[in-house]
Image (cartoon, helix red, strand yellow):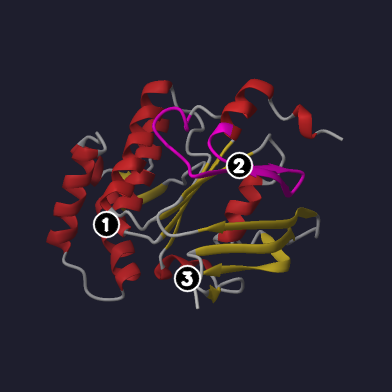
Amino acid sequence: MSAAPLFEIDGLHVATADAGIEILRGVDLVVDAGEMHALMGPNGSGKSTLAAALLGSPEFEVTGGSIRFKGEDITAWPPEVRGKAGLFLAFQYPQEIPGVSVRNFLTQALQARKGTDVSSIETYMTMVEWMERLSIDSELMDRHLNEKFSGGEKKRNEILQMAVLEPDMAILDETDTGLDIDALRIVATGVQEVRAERPELGVLAITHFQRILTSGLHPNRVHVLLDGRIVESGGPELADRLEREGYERYAT
């Protein structure tokens, strides 16, 4: 009997929790351990809704299908349980948390993730190591989380969290938003650094543009999301074609 996929989305239908407006209309996707998948699509295609639904956002309701993680159906799990189990989301627009330093946030998050007492000194040393590798100024450690951070600092801090928390599956929701080419390259290199350190990590990179993929990320598979459905899947060459031709070929 073959092992279950690391992450599997099966026939997922999602609607807004308040008005019941259907946004995702049957999404199927499988990510195996160690794989990177890119999900691409124009604005309004449902990309960020998918990211939010995968992490259990109360703003959306799963009306059909399932989400499975390491063989378990997590469709009804609350966000904190998914996080503790090893599912990670890098937000498109990371929230500011005044009064909570990056150091304290990561220490507490790692304690919640591991379920045991985590050494503050070991966490600190891990943070210092990864901040060097991700080209993050060490003074950021004692600043309040995302408060007055530049766009690049926010995104690199998300990758820092991914490195320190050691998830099994990471979902990157439009991590390239608002970044110039230099910051984008640093973030892409950081993702690859984390993957090199943890080769079994699965990654789903959700993006509107191909540029993050040409800045250092190398997906195994590329998927096109349009009108709440995946309309095509293929290899990295699919992203190149989308860059040349856009999404007009899928219009009906």
- Which mark is nearer the camera, 2 or 3? 2
- N-terminal-most mark, 3 or 1: 3
Q: Is residue 218 magenta?
A: yes
Q: CA distance from mark 3 to mark 1?
A: 29 Å
Disc 3, disc 1: CB below 8 Å? Answer: no
- Which mark is nearer the camera, 3 or 1? 3
Disc 1, disc 2: CB below 8 Å? Answer: no
Give above or below for 17 relative to 126: below
Label 1 element class = helix
Residue positioned 87% across, 35% down in the render:
252
Q: Amino acid at mark 1?
A: Asn
Residue density around tag 2, few if under 14, some if 14–19, many if 20 or more, within 10 Å: few
The picture places residue 172, in percent across and down from the top left corner, at 48, 46
Residue 104: mark in rendering: 1
Give the residue at mark 3.
70
- N-terminal-most mark, 1 or 2: 1
Q: Quadrant of residue 87?
A: bottom left
Give the residue at mark 2.
234
Q: CA distance from mark 2 to mark 3?
A: 24 Å
Q: Amino acid at mark 2?
A: Gly
Q: Amino acid at mark 3?
A: Lys
Left-right relation of 191 to 29: left
The picture places residue 232, in percent across and down from the top left corner, at 69, 43
Along the line of sight, which residue is nearer the eye, 190 or 132? 190
Residue positioned 80% across, 58% down in the render:
19
Q: CA distance from mark 1 to mark 2?
A: 41 Å
Residue positioned 62% across, 27% down in the render:
241
Give above or below for 205 relative to 167: above
In the rendered image, is residue 145 in sight? no
- Which mark is nearer the camera, 1 or 2? 2
For the record, the magenta segment spans 212-237
